[in-house]
Amino acid sequence: MSNTTPTGRTTNLLSHSSDNREPYRTITLTLLRIYPILFICVGTAGNLLSVYVVLRSKLRRHSTFIYLAFLSIIDLAVLYTFCVNFILHAWFNIDLQQVSLTACKIYSFSIYFFPQTSAWILTAVSIDRVVALTRGVRKTRKTRQTYAILISIFLILFLLNIQFLFYNNTYVLSLQNEQQTNVSTNTTSDLTLTSSSVYRIVDTDVDINVIQCSSEYSNEYKYFYSNYWVYIDATVNVYLPFALMFLCSTIIFLSVLRTMRDAHNSNKRLVARNLSTMLLSINAMFVLLTAPIVFYLMFEKRTFKSGANQSDTKLKARYKMIKLLFIILMNANHTGNILVYCLT
């Protein structure tokens, strides 16, 4: 999930069609220029502070806070992967995916790997608490297990997404072929196609959420992307983590209720209540902020299959704005994870 720099439309055509895309074009550009800077500032301060607190105190002896430290680092990586490229795009008209093929591959890999890793670290925290409540594992042994689990998460998700390090940047060629098809049915004579022409993302009809080094634009692997990968990503990124977190939260919630009934002092009841509130808040925030973009990506291709939708510039501009809003929601999850932990 990412942004892209399109190729090949003349300035005259852009200015002529820009009015058709208002007010969506202006809203999209405004959001692209403001939200990444705001999220980077807030997310960097919050996540780095949480890492500092955990590593500088006795909290690092506890498995839960080891997970939280790694979660903060991964969330920071998610924010920088999305927001830095959006800032470069909106303010300087630069796309990291077009800097070099290596940059494109690393960017495409990161856009999937880091959000998935964040989801599974959150899942590991929930499972860790269930184990602690039911088995009471010793801290020293549990710390070793925590690092082993983290390494396993990184390795499995790395292998799942390593495919993006082998795809070529076939997006530009795919876009040019699509534009040539449009030209053949369009009487506009001043429309030109040049791979060196670069325009701002909001000044074209091109999707805002394109991963250029991907199977999506490869003739050889497009079927795999449409029929398998979008569902694999949805399962790994949202469905399975949320199902496990919901199950763990239910177990912990019931355990907390028993603890509150058995508690003979107000402090123990307060701790139990705060633990339950934190878990439910984190899980609810995860699904509410992450699920929309995943669902959208699963169904957007069906929306634009018809020729009428493909030629409707205002419809494309509206969907581009909606998609950006969903990306902002997802980034908000990675910005606010640690804040929810602190507040609850």
Image (tube, grey):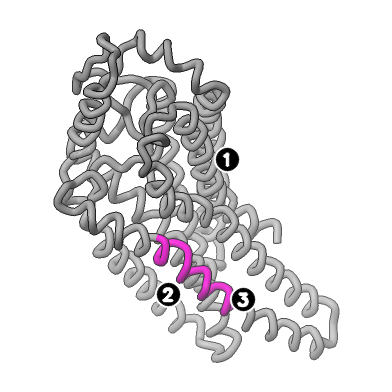
Assess whether residue 210 is covered by the magenta stretch.
no
List the residue tagged with mark 1: 42
The overriding secondary structure of the stretch rendered in magenta is: helix
- Left or right of residue 255, residue 46 in this image: left
Q: From the image, tell me which residue sits under label 2.
A: 146
Q: CA distance from mark 3 to mark 1?
A: 28 Å
Residue under the image location 75 percent in, 84 percent down: 257
The span picked out in magenta is: 234-248
Provide the secondary structure element on which disc 3 rests. Answer: helix
Q: Is residue 191 visible?
A: yes
- Label 1–label 2 contact, CB within 8 A: no
Q: Residue at x 34, y 10 (%)?
A: 11
Question: In the figure, is residue 249 to the left or right of 15?
Answer: right
**In the image shown, does 49 or 188 lie closer to the viewer?**
188
Which mark is on residue 249?
Answer: 3
Residue 19 drawn above or below residue 72: above
Callout 1 amino acid: Val
CA separation in Å, label 1 and label 2: 28 Å
Q: Amino acid at mark 2?
A: Thr
- Residue 82: horizontal and vertical position, in percent? 42, 40
